[in-house]
Amino acid sequence: MSNENNPDEISVDVNSEDTIETKNSHEESEHTDEIEQSSEDSLKLLELEKQKTSQLEEKLKHVLADFQNLSRKTQSDIEQGVNSKINQFMLDFIKIYDDFIRAKEVISESKINADGLNSILKNMESLMEKYNVTPIEALGEIFDPNFHEAISIISDPTLDDNTITKEIRKGYISHERIIRPTLVEISKKEDNDKND
């Protein structure tokens, strides 16, 4: 006996099972859409991160290559600087060595015992060898302006042109660089065509 106008009654909505399933289906659909959207966003983010990583790897490779180049250049500059200082020192040393050679020649001509001087010269030669300073062999060779400096010319029809006939001052190489060219005398054949 219910009275529709009874204020003490509570109204209750009764949902049918279809309404509940529709609501659940709608919620699941929204949830699935959210998951798919989230998955797409995640894939986009992953792709962006892959691109960033690839770019950073390229930058790292360039930086590493630059560092290796700088390291090689620095090492080369240091070696060249050290070799340059050694070469300057050795040039001064060679002048003293030349003086000892001349002294030995004078002593030998005077028939004086030069054994002590020979020992000094051997020690000097060992020092030059230790620092990669080697003499340039020139006598009998063909003149090469990279190694030799011609200061006189003689006429000799028996020799090829530009044959080195005399070493006036020994030249030296250090670390594959000429630190002093050999001063030489070279030959020229007589030019017979001048009389024709």
Image (cartoon, grey):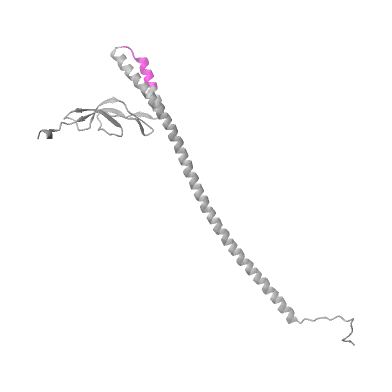
Image-based side of 189 in relation to 67, left or right: left
Quadrant that contains the C terminus: top left
Quadrant that contains the N terminus: bottom right
Main SS of the magenta segment?
helix
- From the top left corner, tell me how far across and down residue 54 is, in percent: 53, 56
Instruction: Classify residue 162 by image quadrant.
Output: top left
Image-based side of 38 in relation to 72, left or right: right
- From the top left corner, tell me how far across and down residue 130 is, in percent: 41, 27
- From the top left corner, tell me how far across and down residue 12 is, in percent: 83, 80
Task: Please tell me which residue is depicted at 39% across the width and 22% down the height of the picture.
Answer: 124
* Relative vertical location of residue 115 with respect to residue 138 in this rendering, above or below: above
Start-end of magenta stretch: 112-123
Task: Please tell me which residue is depicted at 75% across the width and 81% down the height of the picture.
Answer: 17
The furthest residue to the left: 196
Image-based side of 91 in relation to 109, left or right: right
- Magenta stretch encompasses residue 16: no
Task: Please tell me which residue is depicted at 43% across the width and 35% down the height of the picture.
Answer: 80
* Relative vertical location of residue 166 with respect to residue 40 in this rendering, above or below: above
Front residue of 136 and 150:
150
Front residue of 156 and 110:
156
Front residue of 3 and 175:
3
Figure label count: 0
Instruction: Classify residue 25 by image quadrant.
Output: bottom right
Instruction: Classify residue 171 by image quadrant.
Output: top left
- Magenta stretch encompasses residue 119: yes
- From the top left corner, tell me how far across and down residue 60 is, in percent: 52, 50
Task: Please tell me which residue is depicted at 56% across the width and 57% down the height of the picture.
Answer: 52
